[in-house]
Amino acid sequence: MNEVCQFRAEIDTDQEGEYADTVFYVETKLYFLRFKFDNGCTLKYIQKVMHSEKDKVKLVSSQKFKLNG
């Protein structure tokens, strides 16, 4: 697929710039939906198909990461 997801999160620190025992998790989920590209592949079209065919959207993988330091 060669897809990339980039995100940014801000966490409060104490006076010394330490994370003060903050527990931080990142959870990812990968869904699958088979559909035809007959109307082009715009974000609006994909959202419309996903909403109208909710029962066909399948969770195929998920992962939860605990970040330290």
Image (cartoon, rainbow, N blue to C red):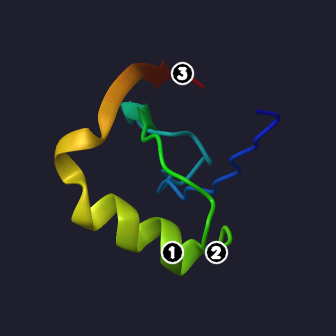
Q: From the top left corner, tell me how far across and down residue 40 is, in percent.
A: 68, 72
Q: Residue furthest left?
A: 55
Task: Find numbered disc 2 in the image and state the secondary structure of the residue it sits on.
Answer: loop
Q: Residues within 10 Å of mark 3 (few under 14, many from 20)?
A: few
Left or right of 46? Residue 21 is left
Q: Amino acid at mark 1?
A: Tyr
Distance from the alpha carbon under mark 3 to that under mark 2: 37 Å
Position of residue 57 in the picture relative to residue 62 (left or right): left
Residue 34 coordinates in the image, percent (x, y): 46, 40
Count of residue discs: 3
Element under disc 1: helix
Residue under numbered circle 3: 68
Query: Tag 3 or tag 1, which sits nearer the N-term?
Result: 1
- State the image quarter where residue 21 is shown: top left
Residue 42, numbered circle: 2
Residue at the (37%, 73%) spot, across then down: 48
Furthest-right residue in this view: 2
Amino acid marked by disc 2: Thr
**Quadrant location of the N terminus?**
top right
Provide residue 4's location: percent of width, then percent of height: 76, 43
29 relative to 5, above or below: above
| Disc 2 and disc 1 in contact, CB within 8 angstroms | yes
- According to the image, label 1 marks what residue? 45
When the figure is inspected, residue 67 is found, relative to residue 18, above or below; the finding is: above
